[in-house]
Image (spheres, grey):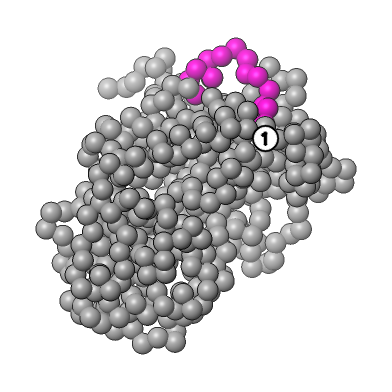
Amino acid sequence: MDVPASTTKSLRVAVLADSDTRWKWGSLTANRISPAESDIRLDGFLLRGRATPTARQLEEVGVRADSLREVTAVEFLREMAKEQYDVLVLALVGGAVQAMLHGLAHAWEGRENRPVVVTGYVGVVYEKLADGLLLRHGADLVLANSRQDADRFQAVYEGVGADASSVTEVALPFLGGTAYPAGGHDPYTVVFAAQPSVPESRKDRTYLLNRLIQHARLHPDREVLLKLRSKPGEHTTHIEELPYQKLVQKADPPANFRLVYGHMGEVLDRTDLLVTISSTAALESLHRRIPTVVLSDLGVREALGNHHFVGSGCLASWDQLDAGHRPSPDAAWVARQGVAAGGPPSGGASYEAAFDVARFRITELLEAETLPALAPYYTPVTAPGYLPGILARHHLGPDGSPLPGAPAADKEPSPVRQIVRRAARGAYRHGVQRVAPVIRRMGEL
């Protein structure tokens, strides 16, 4: 039966992202927080820089935009000044969020109607909490992926005398997928989720690789997979100085060991044991109730990010895993992280309800006659020795206006990157699809 036109509202949403992971978070979040029964037009903007996603990385995310193009900060601000969007999601590193907030405040000066501005984090927040949060202050909604993060975010804002009303509890937008089957898989599959920057040293990365290969040798009946984020030459949210692909060339892994790429959700579909240092993949795995281990081999340290998992019941070493250890997560800790919170791990009602407050707040803001001007905590008065440098990196002056002579586009990318980027745009130009509200209510997009 056709849905009456009056029940469907057209919603124009823009997502500005600066890496593959942040595009994934931003585009999925845009759909999850949009008011129910909305007919979304999703326009994607990729901020030109080191980590601009390739076509393969964009395809791996699995979200289609109605349009997608690469922009500089100044180009994006000019676009926002002339186009009328309902919601804008800033899926960027903290400094870029702050620059865009000031740039947008200048671009929208004197405008009665402006988009609702949303920002947040792509995963676990385990470092630079105060710095990253204050750089995101000024958005209408600052999304926290769990109750724990929401409490911490509010405490930071209140602690410096900033308005904390923007902090809104949600959940990671990419959770979902099928629950771990009671009988497991055949063959039993162990997956190590690698991270581009953790650990950093060759010694530590070689150690982890050797232990993974050793586990494969000790358990020839198991399939042992090294899940990699990017292929050689690609960049991600974090710089990878020593890719495992290079390190493994000097090893002699057994036949049951191999490298895999692709969508993390698809890899988890066949995983019996997820092992990592501190990847957000651990939360995806726990949400599905897949046995999950956060390694303690290199210590439990803030520099590694695995300190976040203290109390989870997931910390263990390779020695323990080799001996057959099976982790048992702490239910209270898991629930406080916003995963598998009292409902089915397949993205059922309780998980979907995690976005209800954000949807309600955005609906309220969209229905308001006017919205106040964006007002970040950092200003030339509160941070005169910090803010100007952040803005200047994006060719903006202290008041958020483009600096005189600021290029509309930075220097042209190399011919190879131009080809890749044209391919990326082409991949989206063909096969564009709308993400319907009914799909948003499913566990995975």
- Residue drawn 60% across and 56% down? 52
- Please identify the dominant SS of the magenta region: loop
Q: Residue 323 at x, y = what percent?
A: 20, 73
- Name which quarter of the figure residue 435 lies in: top left
Q: Which residue is mark 1?
A: 101
Of residue 192 and residue 259, the one placed in the foreground of this image is 192
**Residue at the extreme top of the image, as rendered:** 369
The part of the chain drawn in magenta is 362-376
Please state the horizontal and vertical placement of residue 206, each as a whole percent of the image.
44, 78
Say if residue 442 shows up in the picture. no
Q: Nearer the viewer, residue 39 or 180?
A: 180
- Residue 35 shown left or right of residue 241 in the figure: left
Q: Is residue 42 above or below residue 417?
A: above
Disc 1 element: helix
Residue name at image x 39 percent, y 74 percent: 208
Question: Residue drawn 42% across and 81% down?
Answer: 248
Q: In this figure, what is the number of numbered marks?
A: 1
- On whether residue 373 falls in the magenta region, the answer is yes
Q: 10 Å neighbourhood of mark 1: few (<14), some, or many (≥20)?
A: many
Give how far across and how far down residue 415 sits, in percent: 68, 67
Residue 328 x %, y %: 22, 54
In which quadrant of the rendered image does the C terminus lie? top left
